[in-house]
């Protein structure tokens, strides 16, 4: 056992670092520095750079467009992109439906959808939660009734992230009302431009439009867009939930977040010294760093330990719980660091509006981000559900 | 020893609570906080003229009901329950508190104006470099003939866009962080040379950056002694802190009640989620925080009259405990609601936002822990 990078790893690290330095879109950097919200085109700009390089889906098998990297190389890659503060890639295609399609899909589905996910041609969203089915996802009531070669889909989904931009959505629907809850569910790929689909915005506490309600009214979906067997969609759902949980640890991004908070605390004055010299504040940063190190090494053990390569198991629930708590603490520390200037509400740059936000640049998103990031312990299976999973699957209770 | 309220205090609470139930439901509040002015001025007028509520904490000789800090706490808790944005804190608690402390002709002239609802005062004390240190001031008031000339920048002045008057801390002497040389002025908000940049705040109120550019102010704007204002500022801020703790108690109570109600309606796995023990224990913990916030608010309020060091220790203890409680109750109210708690649609998220801003108002939990330690654990 050792934790040193080999000479090959170090060379790879340099290759990644140089590539980012030379190819990261400068206009994105400017927007990030200004604290502006990212548009669909912004996310795609970086996606397309990585696609051209062949690095957009490191976790995928090589035959479908993956990189063939070792777990260590994948770790280095995510470290380096976070260190350089690259925008995150949207997970719905690359990290979620992509793996479901290459694992469970038909050859036709793989041939059509996977290249479009890699190139960024299709933007995906996730139709899972319903107003009455959150933690109890298997109680979902959206129905798909066979009609010739198609299904007719009716129901309502909610918390559908970025559905306003989506070309395609992957949906859990009920195809057998009489079966036991989890056994009557199917996994459908639905063209978001299909007649009968209505997307309505939900505005969250920080004023953002990230999530939506999606209404499906007599939406016609070819049965060829069902992934895996009819009524076996829960298998895909469970597989995907485990995948969603791994990424959610967010170690590299949180490391970057710690550096950002430290930078703010070096800039903010507290009496005659920087806030970072305040023993109370310093201690909180130190505790957070230690907890992040514990998370990092827990994740590394799962990446490069005896179970490496067997796919995410129930230990990914641990990564989700601790990772989300750390993300929230970071936003809490940022809000604390900016003091009075957490209060002004900046509505964003409107068309032709050059008015500068109130207070320091790093302050005006502090409160909205803190409010918004309360979602991390709720989405992707709430932390209460994750604890249930650990209790049942790991502790055998 | 008696921890019961008087009949008059009960009456104040009941009257105000009924009035707010009629005028301040969540939808109505959302309508006026999103309007151009961000408020409904008729509510302030009604509080003054129909309910006599703005006089609850003032002496009868000024036209008040003869109350004090306890009455302020009652009003602030009720406002907390509706996440009210009425400028009661800066106008009555802070400016009223300062005038009561200095007394004399200034109090005689201005307190009746406050009680009648004719004036709104914003408290311009914070500066961009100062964090929570009340003496860390770059704003200066230089003697000029009979009066003073004011220069400087005050940050995040809540209620300033609505204010007829400003209560301003400024240096008449000393260095940026000296205890001596601080003075307090009550001035007209529309004097020449006062420049405001107004904005909404994340918790539904309005505030301003205020720039004083050679603002000429009269000598009688000075409250208390020139250069000796810090003890007075500390006293009125302590009064404001316990009043804010009272508001927090109201906010936290509603966060807790809203969570209890929601978990009994929301069904998952075939049962109301309130049946899950893990959520029951969490709601018990929230309940205990609400009760302790109420206890610390009363403790702090009753100790406002003690000598400065004892008062400051008590107030810091109250603010530290309430800030931690507000954090816990707010975060867990949202977590227990799940996704719906993060939307703008439900009131719960708006209570959470106010609870969050109260945490840092007049000093974070750590700031007050530090002040408490420095007073009580000094060797």
Image (cartoon, rainbow, N blue to C red):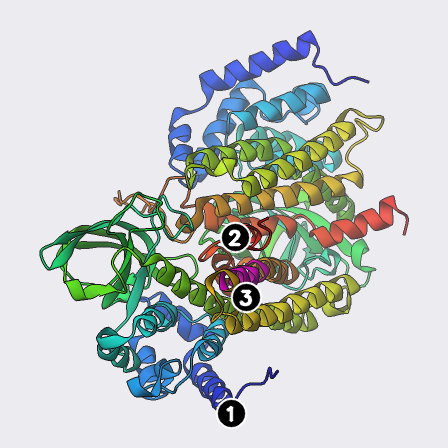
Mark 3: secondary structure: helix
Q: Residue at x 45, y 86 (%)?
A: B12
Q: Mark 1 lies on which chain?
A: B
Tag shown at residue A231: none
* Residue that carries the numbered disc 2 in the rendered image: B371
Q: Residue A389: image x %, image y %?
A: 80, 49
- The image quadrant that residue B34 belongs to is bottom left
Q: Distance between the residues labelled 3 and 2?
A: 32 Å
Q: In this view, does A165 lie above or below B6?
A: above
Residue located beneath label 1 in the image: B7
Q: Which of marks 3 and 2 is nearer the N terminus?
A: 3
C-alpha separation, residue under disc 3 versus residue under disc 1 = 32 Å
Residue at point 26%, 66% (across, down)? B163
Lateral position of residue A367 relative to residue B159, left or right: right
In the rendered structure, which disc, 2 or 1, sits on the residue that comes first in sequence?
A: 1
At numbered mark 1, what does the secondary structure look like: helix, strand or loop? helix
């Amino acid at each position: 056992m050792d934790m040193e990078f080999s000479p090959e790893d170090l060379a790879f690290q340099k290759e990644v670092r140089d590539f980012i330095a030379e190819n990261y879109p400068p206009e994105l950097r400017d927007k990030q520095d200004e604290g502006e919200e990212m548009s669909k085109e912004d996310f795609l700009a970086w996606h397309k750079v990585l696609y051209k390089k062949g690095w957009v889906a490191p976790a995928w098998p090589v035959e479908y467009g993956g990189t063939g990297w070792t777990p260590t190389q994948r770790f280095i890659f995510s470290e380096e992109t976070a260190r350089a503060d690259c925008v995150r890639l949207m997970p719905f295609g690359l990290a979620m439906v992509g793996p479901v399609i290459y694992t469970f899909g038909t050859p036709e589905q793989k041939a059509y959808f996977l290249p479009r996910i890699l190139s960024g041609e299709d933007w995906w969203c996730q139709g899972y939660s319903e107003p009455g089915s959150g933690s109890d996802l298997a109680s979902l009531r959206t129905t798909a009734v066979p009609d010739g070669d198609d299904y007719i889909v009716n129901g309502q989904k909610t918390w559908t992230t970025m559905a306003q931009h989506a070309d395609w959505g992957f949906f859990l629907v009920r195809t057998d009302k009489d079966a036991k809850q989890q056994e009557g569910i199917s996994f459908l790929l639905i063209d978001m431009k299909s007649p009968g689909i209505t997307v309505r915005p939900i505005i969250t506490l920080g004023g953002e439009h990230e999530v939506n309600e999606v209404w499906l009214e007599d939406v016609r979906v070819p049965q060829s867009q069902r992934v895996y067997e009819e009524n076996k969609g829960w298998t895909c759902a469970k597989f995907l939930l485990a995948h969603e949980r791994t990424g959610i640890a967010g170690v590299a991004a949180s490391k970057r977040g710690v550096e950002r908070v430290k930078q703010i605390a070096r800039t903010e004055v507290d009496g005659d010294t920087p806030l970072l010299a305040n023993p109370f504040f310093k201690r909180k940063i130190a505790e957070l760093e230690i907890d992040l190190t514990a998370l990092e090494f827990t994740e590394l053990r799962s990446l490069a330990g005896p179970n490496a390569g067997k796919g995410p198991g129930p230990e990914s629930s641990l990564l989700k719980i601790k990772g989300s708590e750390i993300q929230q603490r970071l936003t809490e520390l940022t809000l604390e660091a900016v003091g009075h200037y957490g209060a002004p509400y900046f509505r964003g740059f409107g068309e032709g509006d050059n008015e500068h936000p109130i207070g320091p640049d790093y302050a005006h998103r502090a409160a909205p981000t803190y409010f918004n990031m309360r979602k991390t312990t709720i989405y992707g299976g709430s932390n209460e559900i994750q604890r249930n999973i650990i209790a049942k699957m790991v502790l055998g209770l | 020893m008696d921890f019961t309220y008087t009949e008059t205090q009960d009456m104040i609470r009941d009257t105000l609570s009924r009035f707010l139930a009629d005028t301040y439901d969540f939808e109505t509040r959302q309508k006026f906080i999103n309007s151009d002015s961000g408020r409904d001025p008729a509510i302030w007028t009604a509080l003054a003229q129909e309910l006599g509520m703005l006089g609850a904490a003032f002496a009868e000789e000024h036209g008040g009901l003869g109350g004090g800090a306890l009455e302020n706490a009652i009003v602030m808790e009720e406002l907390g329950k509706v996440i009210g944005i009425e400028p009661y804190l800066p106008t009555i608690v802070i400016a009223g508190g300062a005038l009561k402390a200095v007394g004399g002709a200034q109090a005689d002239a201005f307190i009746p104006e406050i009680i009648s609802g004719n004036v709104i005062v914003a408290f311009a004390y914070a500066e961009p470099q100062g964090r929570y240190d009340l003496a860390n001031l770059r704003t200066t008031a230089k003697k000029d003939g009979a009066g003073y000339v004011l220069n400087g920048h005050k940050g995040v002045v809540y209620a300033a866009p609505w204010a007829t008057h400003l209560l301003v801390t400024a240096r008449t002497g000393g260095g940026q962080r000296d205890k001596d040389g601080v003075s307090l002025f009550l001035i007209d908000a529309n004097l020449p040379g006062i420049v405001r940049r107004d904005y909404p705040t994340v918790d539904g109120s309005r505030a301003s950056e205020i720039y004083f550019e050679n603002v000429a102010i009269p000598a009688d704007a000075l409250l208390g002694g020139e250069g000796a204002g810090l003890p007075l500022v500390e006293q009125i801020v302590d009064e404001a802190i316990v009043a804010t703790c009272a508001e927090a108690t109201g906010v936290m109570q509603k966060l807790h009640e809203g969570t209890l109600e929601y978990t009994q309606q929301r069904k998952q796995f075939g049962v109301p989620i309130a049946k899950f023990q893990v959520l029951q224990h969490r709601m018990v913990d929230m309940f205990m925080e609400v009760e302790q916030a109420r206890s610390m608010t009363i403790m702090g309020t009753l100790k406002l009259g003690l000598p400065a060091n004892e008062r400051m220790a008590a107030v810091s203890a109250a603010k530290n405990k309430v800030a931690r409680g507000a954090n816990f109750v707010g975060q867990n109210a949202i977590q227990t609601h799940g996704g719906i708690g993060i939307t703008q649609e439900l009131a719960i998220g708006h209570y959470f936002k106010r609870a969050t801003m109260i945490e840092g108002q007049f000093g974070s939990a750590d700031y007050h822990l530090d002040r408490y330690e420095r007073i009580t654990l000094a060797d």
